[in-house]
Amino acid sequence: QVQLVESGGGLVQAGGSLRLSCAASGMIFGFNVMGWYRQGPGKQRELVATVQATNTNYADSVKGRFTISRDNAKRTVYLQMNSLKPEDTAVYYCHYRDFSTYWGQGIQVTVSS
């Protein structure tokens, strides 16, 4: 079992920045993929960014604005979000995958115009 705890969400004005953190605990395997998904009001959950080892993947809508990184010693993945837009408003979910898939409880990010 893997537990994921997210932090760092909140309310920010358009153009501002936030950094999300997700700390993993439990039975962690080194080849895992960690990342972030989001679900906006009335929308389906969508991929934001993932990282496996040094390989990163981003949704087109966040490329150049968001940066995903991980600290393996701390078992933590980060999402630095810059130049935030109102359309980035969503619940952001941390995601972990090795032999199984795990999700965090979700954290609200609200961007006001």
Image (cartoon, rainbow, N blue to C red):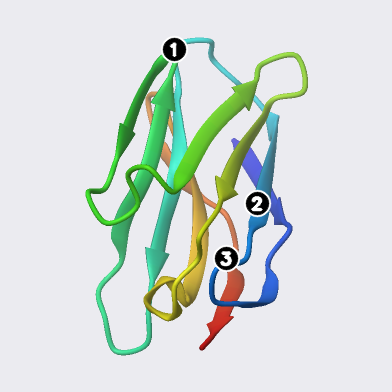
Which picture quadrant has residue 79? top right
Which of the numbered marks, if any, corresponds to residue 106?
3
Question: Residue 71: where, in percent of width, then height?
Answer: 68, 21
Which of the numbered marks, if any, corresponds to residue 20?
2
Sequence-first disc among 3 and 2: 2
Q: Which residue is mark 1?
A: 54
Question: Residue 50: where, in percent of width, then height?
Answer: 39, 35
Query: Could you tell me the amino acid type at mark 2?
Result: Leu
Query: What crowding class fits label 1: few (fewer than 14 Cα within 10 Å), some (14-19), or many (20 or more)?
Result: few
Residue 1, compared with residue 79, is above or below; it is above
What residue lies at 59% left-to-right and 45% top-to-bottom? 80
Query: Could you tell me the amino acid type at mark 1?
Result: Thr
Q: Of residues 7 and 105, which is closer to you in this image?
A: 7
Sequence-first disc among 1 and 2: 2
Q: Of residues 98 and 67, which is closer to you in this image?
A: 67
Which picture quadrant has residue 76? top right
